[in-house]
């Protein structure tokens, strides 16, 4: 099997393998594409929480993006953890140089255990400068609340928050509804001309570490292969739900999901 497309991932590393760059690489690979990386930070963490975060210098992040893309041009880019104004500026500058049209932004702001991963200045900068440059932004409810300065407690609130993000310059928005207290999961996709709601049964488990990273990387992969953005969201949500439902139950805290849920091993390799 040959890779179907090439994805550049700009994100932080998760030493426990469930989220961040590690989850992104696994997702892109499991869905049949080729993953490249620009690491923005190195975290020491496990399923119970984040121990430390070490930033990578903005100049080094730019070098990773530009030098990699000069040789192997990405078909799509997934952006995850950007922890400072300087990093956001460096990434924007590099994106302008490499000129890739399909960009998915997962606005990583808070870790599963509650640790804040981005400061307020960076959030403002992300809204002002980066939002309008990307094809799609994929916040969960806490992230959408931070970005829109509003409380979200219903699917109507989610739609209203998505509309605010469009007014702020986003082209397309997918707000993930996993934090709502409901037996049916609702994820809302919205742009200036359409609104779609993806409904799925909620899977009750604490093992959901890295779901946001995985979802955005899956969307980037499907989108890079020629699917529409809406179809890419639908297929990525199915992949994530299947991966949650077949999770390996590792660790004492919020465990990882099963990124290998799409893979069947050929008989001759067994």
Image (cartoon, rainbow, N blue to C red):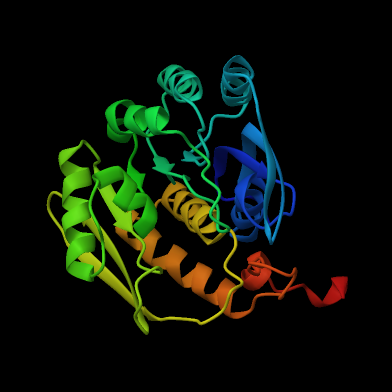
What residue sits 57% from the left and 80% below the top?
245
Q: Position of residue 208 (x, y in %)?
A: 57, 68
Q: Position of residue 136 (x, y in %)?
A: 33, 46
Question: Residue 178, located in which quarter of the rendered image?
Answer: bottom left
Report the side of 135 relative to 34 (left or right).
left
Report the side of 51 relative to 216 (left or right).
right
Question: Residue 270, located in which quarter of the rendered image?
Answer: bottom right
- Residue 71 in view in this figure: yes
**Is 251 drawn above or below residue 149 in the view shown?**
below
**Is 22 drawn above or below residue 134 in the view shown?**
below
Q: Identify the residue at the far left of this view.
A: 193
Report the side of 75 relative to 15 (left or right).
left
What residue sits 32% from the left and 30% below the top?
124
Number of numbered discs on residues: 0
Q: Position of residue 165 (x, y in %)?
A: 22, 45
What residue sits 44% from the left and 46% below the top?
106
What residue sits 13% from the left and 49% below the top?
192
- Residue 138 in view in this figure: no
């Amino acid at each position: 099997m040959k890779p179907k497309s090439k994805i550049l991932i700009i994100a932080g590393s998760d030493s426990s393998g469930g989220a961040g760059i590690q989850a992104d690489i696994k997702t892109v690979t499991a869905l049949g594409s080729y993953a490249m990386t620009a690491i923005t930070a190195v975290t020491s963490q496990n399923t119970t929480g984040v121990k430390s975060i070490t930033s990578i210098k903005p100049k080094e992040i730019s070098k990773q993006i530009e030098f990699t893309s000069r040789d192997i041009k990405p078909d799509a880019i997934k952006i995850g953890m950007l922890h400072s104004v300087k990093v956001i500026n460096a990434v924007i500058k590099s994106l302008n140089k490499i000129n890739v049209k399909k960009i998915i932004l997962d606005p990583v702001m808070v870790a599963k255990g509650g640790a804040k991963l981005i400061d307020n200045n960076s959030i403002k900068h992300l809204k002002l400068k980066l939002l309008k440059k990307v094809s799609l932004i994929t916040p969960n409810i806490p992230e959408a609340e931070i970005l829109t300065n509003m409380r979200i407690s219903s699917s109507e609130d989610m739609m209203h928050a998505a509309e605010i993000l469009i007014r702020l310059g986003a082209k397309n928005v997918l707000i993930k509804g996993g934090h709502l207290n409901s037996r049916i999961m609702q994820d809302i996709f919205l742009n200036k001309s359409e609104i779609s709601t993806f409904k799925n049964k909620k899977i009750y488990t604490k093992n959901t570490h890295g779901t946001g990273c995985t979802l955005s990387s899956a969307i980037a992969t499907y989108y890079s292969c020629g699917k529409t953005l809406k179809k890419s969201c639908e297929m990525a949500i199915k992949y994530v739900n299947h991966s949650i439902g077949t999770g390996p139950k590792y660790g004492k805290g919020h465990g990882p999901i099963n990124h290998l849920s799409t893979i069947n091993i050929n008989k001759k390799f067994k």
